[in-house]
Amino acid sequence: MSDRHNRTDVILIGAGIMSATLGIILKELVPDWKITVFEKLSNAGEESSNEWNNAGTGHAALCELNYTVEKPDGSVDISKAIKINEQFQVSMQFWSYLVNNKMIRNPQDFIIPLPHISLVQGEQNVTFLKKRFEALSNTPLFQGMEFSDDPEKLMEWVPLIMQDRVSNEPIAATKIDSGTDVNFGALTRMLFDHLESKNVDINYKHSVNDVKRTSDGLWELKVRNLDNGTVERHTAKFVFIGGGGGSLHLLQKSGIPEGKHIGGFPISGIFMVCNNSDIVAQHHAKVYGKAKVGAPPMSVPHLDTRFINNKKSLLFGPFAGFSPKFLKTGSMFDLVTSVKADNLLTMLSAGAKNMSLTKYLIQQVMLSKEKRMEELREFIPNAKSEDWDVVVAGQRVQVIKDTEADGKGTLQFGTEVVSAANGSIAALLGASPGASTAVSVMLELITKCFPEHMEEWEPKIKEMIPSYGVSLIENPELQDEIHTLTAQTLCLSEKKPIFS
């Protein structure tokens, strides 16, 4: 082992969107803190943040039906949709601050305006969509949303989907033009370029093998240089574990009590990508449907226009897959080695509770390309197999934990931050809406882990996020002002040229 012993203020593990966001916020708040980053791959944003490993939806609950639940009395609960929308507005404010302060040159390199559409079939679903539309369009956050069950209007909105449709089932959609397509991979790389220019020590091809507390209350990391095999020790006052699915193992190694009784269940995603540019040109929206009965929330089918490397693409999915790896570049032993004495019961309970999910995943893994094409044809009736290729997306690790409401082994579908009582270490776990809420999630983490600095930092945070500490839903005028400003700064208010 090398005797090199390096001391720093903050260590960020993983070079994804979360570490990038936290790094920039801390650099703005305390420029003189020394920050070190370790990433086991050779570039930033290569795992969950990569543009091919997620759907690129700017998750603002504009079209995702799983964020609005129909209650037993028939009304629609929109509280989660409001929360997610407000979190996305926070991200937009932060990104605008980065553009205004020349930390990002051209916002069009990572964010593009794109209509968000929800589309349903069947009388019951149409009734639900109409109720959802009425509930959402009464709030200022969802201004501009339209509803239609007129096939001619739908033909204007989604010609590729309505063309050659022979079903007599009722069909309806909502459309809102203020949606976005976000290239989180490109954004992550831009943020790391900026951090590098601010003398943040970024170490690619470095794997963190161990995390332990020292007698003086610091954290010591054992880090292997994957190029030459040497092992170094690094100590820091604060450690953020943002290594996607790989965070769980490091959280367990830290030994903090808050990391006990937590497990992870890996689910991989598979997308169909259109290789026919004539078809790609006929669709310009993100269209989300309703998850099938028994399917998990993250498997909501959607047909997405994407802009990747200045090229317009068309993706359909996601189909769920299963691999015991916690990262796309992880190990086949990730799942097995994450089971410990303290979370064994939690994991077993989750297995017993989620037999339908297990069955669903097995069915999805067994799907042939032709079976996947049949599902795609529910969206595009005349889709031809030769026009579509299969692409494996990123790994998601759903958090499993014991909750008061649902008991042992409850599968969580959101994003969670687990931190030590003294705030000296925090780990990010979970999946969707993930990247879209990175700024909110990192601000919550800062509040939790650095309470003694919050009073001093608040003015700067408000400069970065003008709505900080204020509910937009309760302040429609502020919401309107912020929405207008961020749309202008991020070039979302005018029509963009459509890339070919």
Image (cartoon, rainbow, N blue to C red):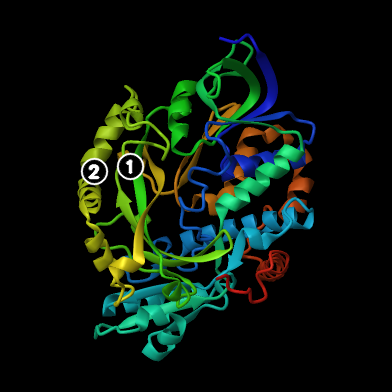
Number of other residues with Cα within 10 Å of mark 2, as a class: few under 14, some 14 to 19, many 20 or more: some
Measured Cα–Cα span from mark 1 to mark 2: 8 Å
Q: Dot 2 corresponds to which residue?
A: 353
Left or right, 76 with respect to 100, comes to: left
At x 78%, y 53%, the residue is 102
Q: Dot 1 corresponds to which residue?
A: 410
Q: How many marks?
A: 2
Residue 490: image quadrant is bottom right
At x 25%, y 85%, the residue is 166
Question: Quick one: 367 or 239, which is closer to the camera?
Answer: 367
Q: Is mark 1 on a helix, strand or loop?
A: strand
Residue 182: image quadrant is bottom right
Check whether the beta carbons of the residues at disc 1 and disc 2 lie within 8 A of each other: yes
Left or right, 122 with respect to 5, comes to: left
Residue type at mark 2? Lys
At x 21%, y 40%, the residue is 352
> Residue 459: percent from the left, percent from the top?
79, 47
Q: Is residue 164 above or below residue 298?
A: below
Residue type at mark 1? Thr
Left or right, 265 with respect to 429, comes to: left
> Residue 339: percent from the left, percent from the top?
32, 27
Quick one: quadrant of the C terminus? bottom right
